[in-house]
Image (tube, rainbow, N blue to C red):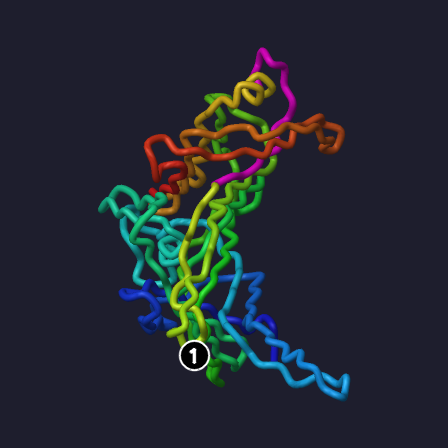
Amino acid sequence: MLTRKTVILAKVESQYGTDPTPTVSANAILVKNVDMKVQGETLQRDFLKASISQLTFVRGVRHAEVSFETELKGTGTRGSLPAFGWEGALFRACGMLETVNAGVSIVYSPVSASVESCTLYVYKDGIFHKITGCRGTFKLNFEVGKYATVSWQFSGLYNDPADASPGAQTFSSVVPVPVLGASLSIGGYAAVAEKLEIDLNATLAPRRSLNAANGIVEWIIANREPQGSFDPETVTEATHTFWANWKAASALALSIGPIGTASGNIVTVAAPKCQYKEISYQDRSGVLAYQVPFALGMNSGDDELTITIT
């Protein structure tokens, strides 16, 4: 069996935990760095007896976790969802509302209620794992000259694996564009940085139930504390007041994009209130730079981060 022969399908559930039956022709997603774990409690039977030998243990609550990376790119047609191979199901299962403005844009923004879920099919070269009731979180990764990626992390309900292969998959033909001319801006200042990370940082929590076959009735997004970091070159305070903004905990507008120029494959990410958590110095091949972790706050609520595809 081969590690590279891994396939993931994803589809939004109409009812939590009910398999919507994703297909290889409509729901296959290009992924890399897949890490799947089936978790189960080990219940030791530590009773007193004449022998010090251990008793066999019992398996308790069970669930599944999966993480992977995808490209951050568009659908290929402006303001239109594709027929196959789109990561929108993943954003929706991470507590992001999908708004399709026909012919104009697709926008993802956070929600605090009615969070959707998805089913993931994970094929590991002949071994098939079905993970229903998935909810998750993600991190956006931008690095100069490389295409942007999304790192995903999901938790879901355990189902017994089976021997199965997915069959031929149909993937999106849209090609990601490198992060060049990306118009990174913080508080109106065009920072010279090599990397930017934006992490939704959602907290996933299980609802345990005596009635659930595997001990968990649902995975919920209990909280989110969006954050990130970037590495701008140092400049004088007269150019940009990094230190004054840190001291005052100033809330600055952050944006990156548009990335790309082809209609249907342009990505822009924005946050209305970015606050510097700390500032430290670093050397970048002889260039003095900062490392700046930040937090993302809300404006009016459920608007601390937007991802727009045009």
Res. 170 visible in picture: no
Q: Which residues are magenta?
A: 226-241
Q: Amino acid at mark 1?
A: Gly
The residue closer to the viewer here, 130 or 174, is 130
Please state if 99 lies on the left or on the right of 142 as rendered.
left
Q: Residue furthest left?
A: 102
Q: Disc 1 marks which residue?
A: 167
Q: How many marks?
A: 1
Q: Is residue 14 above or below residue 307?
A: below
Camera-side residue of 248 and 12: 248
Determine the residue positioned at 58% across, 27% down: 192
> What's the residue at 59%, 38% (across, down)?
195
- Camera-side residue: 6 or 175? 6
Q: Residue at x 46, y 49 (%)?
A: 202
Residue drawn at point x = 45 percent, y = 32 percent? 255
Q: Where is residue 136? Give x, y as percent.
A: 45, 56
Q: For residue 294, say whether it is visible.
A: yes
Query: Which quadrant: the N terminus?
Result: bottom right
Q: Is residue 127 left or right of residue 103?
A: right
Quadrant of the snapshot with the C terminus: top left
Image spot of residue 205 (x, y percent): 46, 57
x and y percentages locating residue 70 in the rendered image: 49, 56
Residue 293 against residue 129 in the figure, above or below: above
Q: Is residue 141 magenta?
A: no
